[in-house]
Amino acid sequence: MTPASLHPYEHSILSAITNTRTLMSGDRIAIACSGGPDSLAALFSLTALARAGHLPLPVCVLHYHHGMRGAEADADADYVIDMATRCGIPAEVGYGQGVGWNEQQARDHRYAWLVNAARKRGANVIVTAHTSTDQAMTVLLRMLRGTHTDGLAGIPPRRELSKGIDVARPLLGETRDAGIAYLNDIGVASRHDPTNDNTDFPRNRLRNTFGKLTSEFNGNLTDALCRIGDAARDDSAFIGMHVQALLDSAMTSVAGIWKIAPLAAAHPALRSRAILDILARTLPQDCHEAALVELNVRTLGNLLINGGKVVLPGRFHVEARGPWLVFSDSGKHPGMALGINQTIGLPNGLEIQLLPVTGERDVVADPSGMSCFVTLPSGSKGVVLRLARSGDRLGPKRTVTDVCRAAGIPPEERPGVWVAVYPSTGDVLWVPGVPFGQRALQSGVLPTHFLVGSYPSGGC
């Protein structure tokens, strides 16, 4: 069959795939199919293209039964199996226990199962049937929520979903109505999911009003919103080519801690994109929808310049502490456990080791403050390195603030000072690089361990 002999809808899908490289000749394709008109249009059009030699035949059809609609959902699963059989493609159904799931949880469970099922079947790409109608509503919905400009890019034609598994959307250039017309032409009926009529969900409410918006404001609203998405995606991709270098310069060796200086010095366009990436990497997945918005990007941008702290959705704390931007779920970054005979690199470039005291050793206080002898409690597995906290004390008479003041550390830098503490009591043992005497030696107790800091070649 030549392209000219394809159904116009199939020909249009082929053109989109060719122009965007959404699917490629070496792909092993799994099609996610709900039984609705969009996914059936994807199933039958891609099967037709495969039969005509333009694509590899999909290796499987995947349907996820959320366990939320009883017999009606059972019938959907049976129907998808029938349609897959009609296309000559094996089908697999996954089952969830979805009672009580919200929209995001249902989506997360569905995609997790799709990835596992695709991997089991040897597929490297999962096709989902998002259309230009979905794209337009996604862009508009994100506008209404106050998205960052990256959010205007909407749904990408193809992206990595999990290691070795991509998700592809070859129908993004077609409207939902075009897919329904195609199914009517080839004599395929579709299923209807009544949860799509539930206006408790924002997307469903928007779907019900989208036609009115189109008729009252812009007869080509879908095209207009999709063009905004395309332009935003191009801009985002260009900025993304440069933002990784900024992220690399701001990243530290400690999860949840970033360097402020390179972020604060960057161009606002790069800085805001870097903040968005940092939020996406750092915050829990279930906070993303509420947190990845322009308001929070601007809030953190101001925090980088002016200092302070904020609480983001999910009660996730972000604070500018000295030279560090610190993320934590409790307002107190937990730091890092340093075990015996282990080395840990701090974000300021110091490498800290905890070594046992063995044999005869000349135990002498280090006036540079780059080492410290300590006595660990029996059974202790090490110490914790963390940022200093308000009220941290070095014994009964001195606070960490006192020690930092005596060492000439400016007040604005003191929140970014690192300390070594007993994990069981929180007692501060050492401020690396600050000479204040040796607690273990002063106590008259033979030290059991030796904390030592050094800068590796290359310095900070």
Image: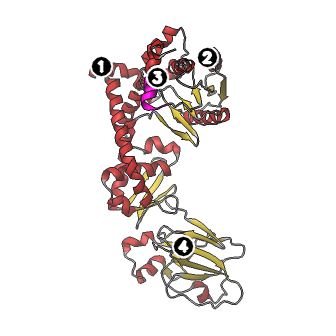
Calculate the distance from the C-alpha at mark 1 to the C-alpha at mark 2: 36 Å
What kind of residue is marked 4?
Glu
Q: Where residue 80 sits: x, y (%)?
A: 62, 19
Q: Earlier in the sequence, mark 4 or mark 2?
A: 2
Mark 1 vs mark 2: in front? 2
The tag on residue 14 is: 3
Q: Are marks 3 and 2 in contact (CB under 8 Å)?
A: no
The tag on residue 219 is: 1
What kind of residue is marked 1?
Gly
Residue name at image x 52 percent, y 28 percent? 128
Q: Quadrant of residue 16?
A: top left
Colour scheme shown: secondary structure
Instruction: Give the secondary structure at mark 4.
Output: strand
Calculate the distance from the C-alpha at mark 3 to the C-alpha at mark 2: 18 Å
Q: Earlier in the sequence, mark 4 or mark 1?
A: 1
What kind of residue is marked 2?
Cys
Q: State whether residue 296 appears in this view.
A: no
- Is 272 inside the magenta-drawn segment? no
Residue name at image x 42 percent, y 83 percent? 406
Mark 4 vs mark 2: in front? 2
Q: Range of the magenta residues? A: 13-22
The tag on residue 351 is: 4
Q: State whether residue 41 appears in this view.
A: yes
| Relative side of 185 to 141, left or right | right
Calculate the distance from the C-alpha at mark 4 to the C-alpha at mark 2: 61 Å
User: Which residue is at the far left?
Assistant: 217
Q: Which residue is mark 2?
A: 87
Q: Are marks 3 and 4 in contact (CB under 8 Å)?
A: no
Q: Earlier in the sequence, mark 1 or mark 2?
A: 2
Main secondary structure type of the part rendered in magenta: helix
Of 166 and 454, the residue lying toward us: 166
Instruction: Give the secondary structure at mark 2.
Output: helix
